[in-house]
Structure formats: C-alpha cells, structure tokens
Amino acid sequence: MQALREIHEVTSDTVTIKIPKRFPYKQVEIIVLPVEGRDSKANPWETTNKIREQLERSGHTFSDSAELIREDRGW
C-alpha cells in the first residue's frame, strides 16, 4: 500500500491535495486531523494518545489493522 502524508496550512474552507500520476489506486479514504504538538520538544506519544482519545470520544469503532493483517496472512 502506498500512502501520502501532507501537512497544509488551513487558510480557507478548502484544502487541495495533488495526487502523484503514479499513484496506483482509484479510490482513497481522506481523514483530516489537526496537527498538534508541532513543538520539536513535544513527546510524539503524547500527541498520538491525544488523537486516540479524540477518536474514542467520537463513538466510532476502529478495527485493529495489525490484527487484520495477521488474519489476512494466516498468522
């Protein structure tokens, strides 16, 4: 799987993402998350845990992608 990660400044209600010509997929999922903890001294796990807490509070359930990979590969 090929993934794109870009950080954009939000200056209006629209963000444009340019997809490389060699991107092999016809369908994508776009998730917009705020960038937190951009301070170079920030603990990356602190930011990760904040995002996880926000996702938990959303009420949605998210599968464990590592577990899905194990199932797919028969591990």
Image (cartoon, rainbow, N blue to C red):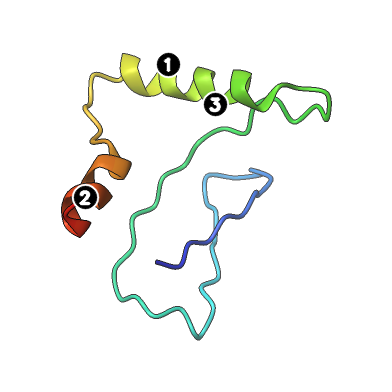
User: Which mark is in front, 3 or 2?
Assistant: 2
- Could you say where residue 51 lies in the image, as x and y percent from the top left? 48, 24
Residue 43 x/y as whole percent: 71, 21
Q: What residue lies at 52% left-to-right and 44% top-to-bottom?
A: 13
Give residue 6's mark: none
Q: In the image, what residue type sits under mark 3?
A: Thr
Q: Is residue 51 left or right of residue 12?
A: left
Q: Quadrant of residue 38?
A: top right
Q: Nearer the observer, disc 1 or disc 2?
A: 2
Secondary structure found at label 3 = helix
Q: Earlier in the sequence, mark 3 or mark 1?
A: 3
Which quadrant holds the N terminus?
bottom left
Local secondary structure at mark 1: helix
- Secondary structure of the residue carrying numbered label 2: loop
Residue at point 23%, 36% (across, down): 63
**Label 1 CA crowd tier, 10 Å (few <14, some 14–19, many 20+):** few
Distance from Cα at disc 3 to Cα at disc 1: 9 Å
3 or 2: tag closer to the N-terminus: 3
Q: Is residue 14 above or below residue 20?
A: above
Query: Left or right: 73 with respect to 4?
Result: left
Q: Nearer the viewer, residue 53 or 72?
A: 72
Which residue is located at x 30 percent, y 20 percent?
A: 58
Residue under pointer 2? 75
- Residue 39, image x and y in percent? 80, 27
Kind of residue indicated by mark 1: Glu
Residues under labels 3 and 2: Cα distance? 27 Å
Residue 48's tag is 3
**Residue 49, image x, y percentages:** 51, 19
Q: Which residue is mark 1?
A: 53
Residue type at mark 2? Answer: Trp
Neighbor class of circle 3 (other Cα within 10 Å; few <14, some 14-19, many 20+) is few
